[in-house]
Image (cartoon, rainbow, N blue to C red):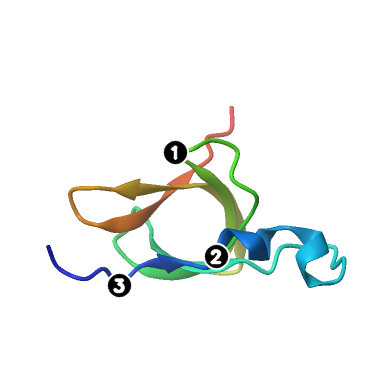
């Protein structure tokens, strides 16, 4: 299994009280987007065992979604939120 180019910071960085009550998460990561590019994202508090809410800026646009781990590629993958 090859070493992944993707990563996410420790979960404790997502909790506001961990860093003196900051109003936003300090948890960052580098994940693979659907277009195949690696991008830096800000991660929230995990809402399930399998996914973590996330947001990023892509070409000047705010995008939100969730991050999951792909066992086949050993990488963290961005999954965009679908708006109706």
Q: CA distance from mark 3 to mark 2?
A: 16 Å
Quadrant (top left, top right, bottom left, bottom right) of the C terminus? top right
Is residue 58 visible in the rendered image? The answer is no
Q: Nearer the viewer, residue 42 or 33?
A: 42
Q: Are marks 3 and 2 in contact (CB under 8 Å)?
A: no
**CA neighbours of label 3 inside 10 A, class few (<14), some (14 to 19), many (20+):** few
Say left or right for 63 vs 6. right
The structure residue drawn at horizontal position 33% and vertical position 67%, both measured from the top left corner, is 37
Disc marking residue 5: 3
Q: Secondary structure at mark 2?
A: loop
Residue 13: percent from the left, percent from the top?
66, 65
Callout 1 touching callout 3 (CB < 8 Å): no
> In terms of sequence position, does the residue under pointer 1 or pointer 3 come before the other?
3
How packed mark 2 is, by other alpha carbons closer than 10 Å (few <14, some 14-19, many 20 or more), is: few
Q: Position of residue 14 (x, y in %)?
A: 67, 59
Labels 2 & 1 near each other (Cβ < 8 A): no
40 displayed left or right of 1: right
List x then y, in percent, for residue 83: 58, 33
56 left or right of 79?
Answer: right
Q: Which residue has dot 2 on it?
A: 10
Question: CA gap, disc 1 to disc 3?
Answer: 20 Å
Q: Quick one: 56 or 29, which is closer to the camera?
A: 29
The residue that disc 1 covers is: 50
- Residue 64 appears in the rendering: yes
- Element under disc 3: loop
């Amino acid at each position: 299994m090859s070493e992944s180019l993707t990563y996410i910071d420790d979960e404790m960085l997502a909790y506001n009280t961990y860093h003196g009550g900051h109003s936003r998460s300090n948890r960052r990561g580098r994940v693979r987007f659907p277009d195949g590019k690696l991008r830096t994202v800000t991660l929230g508090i995990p809402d399930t065992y399998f996914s973590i809410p996330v947001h990023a800026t892509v070409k000047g646009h705010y995008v939100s979604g969730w991050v999951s781990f792909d066992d086949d590629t050993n990488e963290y993958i961005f999954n965009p939120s679908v708006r109706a």
